[in-house]
Image (cartoon, coloured by chain):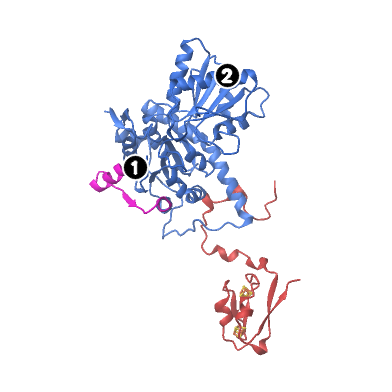
Amino acid sequence: MTQRVGIEVSRAVAIAARLANVDVVAAYPITPQTHIVEDLSEMVASGELDASYIPVESEHSAMSSCLGSAAVGARTFTATASQGMELMHEVLYVASGMRLPIVMAVANRALSAPISIWGDHSDVMSVRDTGWIQIFVTNGQEAFDNIFCAFRIGEDRRVLLPVMIHLDGFQLTHVIEPIYLEDQDKVDKFLPPNEYPLPLDPDRPVTMGAFGPPDIYTEVKKAQDVVLTSSKEVILEAWKEFGDIFGRYYSPIQCYRCEGAKVLLMTMGSFSETAMSAVDAMRDDGNAVGLLNLRLWRPFPFAEIRQAVKDIDVLIVFDRALSFGGPGGPVCSEVRSALYNLDKKPKVVGFVGGLGGRVVSLAGFREIIERGTRIAKEGTEQEFEMFGVRE
Amino acid sequence: MTESEGKPTWQQIEIGAIITEPGSARQYQTGDWRTQRPTYAHERCIKCGLCSIYCPEGCIEPNEEGYFEADLFYCKGCGICARECWTKAINMVEEE
Ligand code: SF4
Ligand code: SF4
């Protein structure tokens, strides 16, 4: 029987990796990811998990080891955050370019300087273009569930790409939530063994990661972009089947109380649940507002976003990262460009906040929705506005 | 759309550009980088083979008479052989 237990989300993620029957974990500890890999190393040490745990000396080595293990066809898991992800940055491109289905949990955290161990999405946005499938999770259950989905999607023959699961540092990693920890046989039913089609094998030698001269590089990159874009079909299929087995359905964007709304707020990650409460409160007061919770960040869900906003007047996008000297929030600027060529589109108002662990409360989201609506009505929208900054 | 000119299209690229055919680097014509080519004064050559050891392409081999010469399919014209040859038997000349 599936049990619902109160458990720290990091520990649930480690259990998910165990239930996914990973073969190799190569990781370096960094706050706020530490509990995930600490638990996995204990599971391997105690024999509870039959896997190799490679205690590397840096995140660069962690991801490099993951390349090797995925290349021989081993199911490979790692986790990192913030500066750690920056240190492995160049290797991230190699993982996607070589089409190795590694799964990585990212405990989203701000980037230095100044030093901050607290959460935001600066680290996510710095790896936006690395060619990984990227999924934001809203709560602990989604984090747990999407570890299985990530392996299933990444290892699918039609995909063969690495997958990041973004879970907010502290706000998710360090909280205890009630989570359904699923049974092994149900997981096994959903997640078949990994069969990488062209593994490193002495009996069938191949060359991986060779150089690509100018007359081949463009074609390789085109193929990579097409496969990432079209992986959406496989993601939808995996989420559907996951729902059919486990009873929890996921979608690229979750439309929360969008019926009849003329104003929608878009958020991602754990902040979406707070924003939902703000929407509830505003609905109670008779305001036709709703929330779009963005789950699928790469491949970017163009069609779903266009569909979700087709009848609304105002879309307010709340980012937790800043593109310095640029258009403000990365999500907002992508949403804007996704809508630009449409004849009928809502006004898009961008806010950036929740940086480096700064809390945005229910009242804060209410203020964002009200302020965004007013800005749209007055026509005074700028590229973006910083929310909650002292002046 | 660009013509494929016998080279693979993006649809034909193997997953992650994995190379399944051993030794396919042989097909890579580094010779088309060349702006200079080595020419040989055989009367000065003592057939020591030093040029072949220094050649970064490994493309120098003795011909039927034992004189060391470059395979111009691979020779990229770097001139290292000419510089290292102690009898000055190799002279680099501009490609037309
Ligand atoms: S190094 Fe000079 S002398 Fe020696 S084999 Fe080459 S060309 Fe001849
Ligand atoms: S020019 Fe360079 S590549 Fe050509 S034969 Fe001499 S050493 Fe080799």
Q: Which mark is residue A373?
A: 2
What is the three-letter code of the residue carrying label 1?
Thr
Q: Colour of chain A?
A: blue
Q: Position of residue A132 (x, y in %)?
A: 49, 42
Tell me where residue A246 appears, x and y as whole percent.
36, 28
Tell me how far mark 1 sits from mark 2, CA to CA: 40 Å
Numbered tag placed on residue A34 in the rendering: 1
Q: Residue at x 65, y 85 (%)?
A: B88
Q: Amino acid at mark 2?
A: Thr
| Relative image position of residue A169 (x, y in whole percent) | 40, 36
Does residue A70 appear in this view? no
Q: Residue at x 64, y 79 (%)?
A: B82
Residue A140 image label: none
Name above or below for residue A96 compared with residue A343: below
Residue at the extreme front:
A391
Give the extent of the magenta segment. Answer: A38-62
Mark 2 belongs to chain: A
Q: Nearer the viewer, residue B3 or A289?
A: A289
B63 vs A255, left or right, is right
- Say whether disc 1 or disc 2 marks the residue closer to the N-terminus: 1
Q: On the rendering, which quadrant does ligand 2 occupy? A: bottom right
Q: Nearer the viewer, residue A7 or A361?
A: A361
